[in-house]
Amino acid sequence: IRYPGGNFVSGYHWEDGVGPKAERPSKLDLAWSVIESNQFGLNEFMDWAKKANTTPMMAINLGTRGVEDAKNIIEYCNIEKGSYYSDLRRKHGYDAPHNIKLWCLGNEMDGPWQMGHKTADEYGRVAEEAGRIMRMVDPSIELVACGSSSLNMPTFASWEATVLDHCYDQVDYLSLHQYYGNYDNNTPDFLASSVAMDDFISSVVSICDYVKAKKRSKKTINLSFDEWNVWYHSNEQDKKIARWSRAPRQLEDVYNLEDALLVGSMLITLLKHADRVKIACLAQLVNVIAPIMTSDKSAWRQTIYYPYMHASKYGRGTVLNTVVNSPVYESKYGDAPYLDSICVANEEDETLTIFAVNKDLNESMEITCDLRQFADYNIVNHIVLTHEDLKANNTEANPDNVVPKSSNSSKVENGILICVLEKQSWNVILLKKSYKNE
């Protein structure tokens, strides 16, 4: 889980969020025009990460700060004792180092909206220097360089190539960011956004490999898709927030079924590219464009919670090279398949999971899948998320309006899976190896 930004990190002084809370300053957050209290900071995040049993991904400020700050924060986090910043951490009550191994070198530095926005040459140089200094402090870390903040940036491709030309030897990953919205209320085009995501990933892989060839390098740069989601519902209401508010209800998209279908297709797209996409962070997790919403009284799951939870719970193992033969429809992104699907095998648990999205808004779809190499596997469950109303959502008052259900529309005959996918549905088909004496 990536912390603390986003755009916020490009003006952030991490020192403001450590030490006694009574002494922490309130600061203007220029990224979102709000007051940042700094009552939750680096050490609180690490406490939370341990409780959540998640790997931290720390971002540093390469917008308004630079190499010196990069050196200081990694010393604070990863050196045991005996230096100024490691001893400062110990003074703050953390004797053991945090040992953060994954670091983002800034955020969206190609964006003119970013504090400390840089050209590709400027950013590539500071990323190379910051990465080199950070590795001098802790050689065991991994580093993520900023790629384009979306496929639509006018500098896309040239930005990646130039940045990597500078810092290829220092970094391990290149980042991608992309959000999608249904501004035109055109559901087929909106659901075809996964085609654009697929093209985005393939293009960035090509650029990374071009620079690899150019440098005659033996190292392969992998991808970190560290911001992705649907984001558009809250745009208008956020314009009404008074400047310099404290903790306003901001970016609180209320998600519907069609959003969940696209999130499902995006998850499938990420899994399809698991050979190169090694990190992928949904932005974000609670309240702000999030699968989980809260109020002062309760918490509830948004529609997008379910495909994300299913992929996390059942998508562990080895992604299989899944060949999908599906009819297509025309979209603004080109031909889009009605069916998105991927298979994941877990040898340790002897399970096979098939994720599938039927994007047809009018008809159910019968599919077959050749599973003869999994001859002893039988269906455990077929989970379906759908609703007659594409705009249906979950609210505090009605939290179970759009929830998964089990289907009995799947069977395996002579090694062939046959199942029916309901129209406009997200599907998880779970199979497990069975033995004759069971």
Image (cartoon, rainbow, N blue to C red):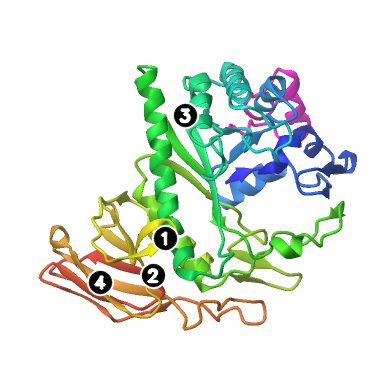
Looking at the rendered structure, the secondary structure element under dot 2 is loop
Q: Are marks 2 and 3 in contact (CB under 8 Å)?
A: no
Q: Which residue is mark 2?
A: 359
Q: Which residue is mark 1?
A: 265
Name the amino acid, label 2.
Lys
Disc with the residue nearer the chain's start (3 vs 4):
3
| Magenta residue check for 418 | no
Of all residues, the one furthest to the left in this rendering is: 414
Disc with the residue nearer the chain's start (2 vs 4):
2
Name the amino acid, label 4.
Ile
Hey, which quadrant is residue 333 in on the image? Answer: bottom left
Q: Is residue 102 left or right of residue 25?
A: left
Q: Are marks 2 and 1 in contact (CB under 8 Å)?
A: yes
Instruction: Tell me how far mark 2 sits from mark 1, CA to CA.
Output: 9 Å
**In-front residue for pair 218/192:** 192
Looking at the rendered structure, which numbered label has been put on residue 379? 4
Name the amino acid, label 1.
Ser
Instruction: Tell me how far mark 1 sits from mark 3, CA to CA.
Output: 27 Å
Q: Which residue is mark 3?
A: 172
Which residue is depicted at the point 31% across and 62% down?
A: 353
Disc with the residue nearer the chain's start (2 vs 1):
1
Other-residue count near label 4 (Cα within 10 Å), few / some / many at <14 / 14–19 / ≥20: some
Other-residue count near label 1 (Cα within 10 Å), few / some / many at <14 / 14–19 / ≥20: many
Marks 2 and 1: which is nearer the front? 2
